[in-house]
Image: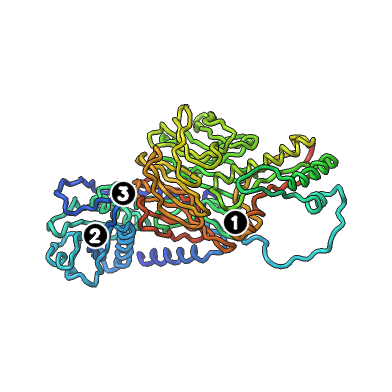
Amino acid sequence: MMARIWTTVVLVATLVFAAEHVRAQEQRVPLRIVITEGVIEPMPIALPTFSVGNPGDRELASRITAVIVDDLTGTGLFRRISPDAYLSSDTGADSRIRFADWRAINAQALIAGSVVTANDVIEVNFRLFDVFAESEFGKGVRFTSDVGSWRRVAHKIADSIYQRITGELPYFDSQVAFISESGAKGNRIKQLAIMDYDGANARALTDGTDIVLAPRFSPDGGLLIYTSYETGTPSVYLLNLRTGARQAVLQNPDMAFAPRFFPDGGKVVLSLTIDGNTDIFEVELGSRKVRRLTSSAAIDTAPSVSPDGNWIAFESDRSRRQQIYIMRARDGEPRRISFGEGRYGTPVWSPTGDYIAFTKQYRGRFHIGVMRADGSDERILTASFLDEGPTWSPNGRNLMFFREEPGELGGPSIYSVDVYGRNLRRINTPQFGSDPSWSPIRR
Amino acid sequence: MKLKVMVSLVSLAALVACSGDVLDTGVAGNASGGLGSGGGIGQAELQNYEPDSPEYFTELIGNTVYFEVDQSVISEDSAAVLRQQAQWLNQNTEYSVLVEGHADEQGTREYNLALGARRAAAVKSFLTDLGVADIRLATVTYGKERPVAVCSSETCWSKNRRSVSVVERESGG
């Protein structure tokens, strides 16, 4: 059964992208968005539907163009000038660009591309132009893959544009593991699932027989670690996304949950409950050696390791209410870093290591927020009846989390928001979705 | 040819969007379960349970005790129920108990798992103190995963902050 599920996964995973190497071109920078806290006026861009040599490729070209447009405008940093306003129609990647026509409609950047298919292989070229400098911005790139992966090609192109114009690392060609929820609120069916970052290509990885919770990606994106009730009590499992192989991390009757990887991928942190008391442990995946990291009578859970591997953030109610603590990964006294009003939980270290995202409960409302790793500079990004479980985009510029609507018919949905609290968006999932985990950028 | 690819993509997407209760795994015939057996009005004649039956334990003594917000302290009301549970268990030693700990939805997932475990452990410890053998008592936490009441206000939340003692006949030995 698992084997069949995995056929498609293997196909996707073994795709090879042939991309001409993009050399970051030194340019004086008129074409640049610097992402800061203030209000950003979206950059107007012209992005005509990619041209085709063969009329049969038209539909595919317009789909690819639409994905690039969604990626870029979805950041809130770009605005696509309506194609109805375009004065030029000849924008093939190799054709001459009449910059005056694009300047006339106030486009700052022009993205021109072309699509060719042959024998189920797709070849997409694109070029990015700085309209006011009347020059190409970076080098043109050609992506080649099988036709079935056209969305990934589109994401790669959007990543390339985003990266050049913002100077930030990319994030569109990434996936999100999550829990797909269905059925009545009192007896939810929960399935491990995975989708593209924009909600496309969602598919389930378990059949819903057992409760599953909170998948997390390994640092290389090849594994998921998650909690399942298949033995009757919560325990932690590894799933290899390439082979479909699955294994239990621990062979013991204790309850285990809240697993996450160390950045080297060789160890994980998790919570074990022994005689009703929950503490934090690390497990070496090779030897399965278990080491205790905290030993308090309090609830210590939701650990997250810093990107350099030296620190662990976790939540504890040792000071009576849930708060965030950090400690050295080797040993040492935990130090509390959250001191605002309310309760703080689910700390998650950002990919760059400077910020920790968290869930905050205050006066019956739930919030997603970020603070520096020393607890300073707290920013609350969202508010609702129940916002929970942040996960960082691979470039640390955005967060996903889930928001639960109240009541019998209410359920969770996955949302994204940028680190300044702008651009809140709901991700379309086939059913209710919770516990998102953002993958690293795909290769 | 290419058009065909597109068409099948579209219909696949539509299929996923409309498939019933369970997200399609792409595997035929594994769409287990659907909605729980909720709904409808049940009717049953009142029973006179045998004092040594699990139904007596579950229905007459009561298998559930409740907790205050964020607490695992056994209240006086709960203690009264648990004393009867212990007495019954001490008289019916062929049964074991799985103590489930639960939390309301007002909390984060991991914390609620730990809180449910704490509640289950508090009940187990109360029962062992009254002479029920440790090996007859197992615990599990469900955190906020299995509410019995599904509104989003204190009326329901107070019913969900609970432990449930599930009696099972010991399977052997």
Q: Which corner quadrant of the image does residue A309 belong to? A: top left
Seen in the image, is B141 located left or right of residue A383? right
Q: Is residue A79 above or below residue B108?
A: below
Residue hosting label 1: A188
| Mark 2 and mark 3 on one chain | yes
| Identity, as a three-letter code, of the amino acid under mark 1 | Arg
Residue hosting label 3: A170
Is mark 1 in CB contact (under 8 Å) with mark 2? no
| Identity, as a three-letter code, of the amino acid under mark 3 | Pro
Disc number for residue A43? 2
Residue B93 in picture, x, y percent from top left: 83, 39
| Identity, as a three-letter code, of the amino acid under mark 2 | Met
Is mark 2 in CB contact (under 8 Å) with mark 3? no
Seen in the image, is B101 located left or right of residue B8? right
Disc number for residue A410? none
Tell me the chain of label 2.
Answer: A
Q: Dot 1, crowdedness within 10 Å: few (<14), some or many (≥20)?
A: many
Is mark 3 in CB contact (under 8 Å) with mark 1? no
Residue B50 in picture, x, y percent from top left: 87, 51
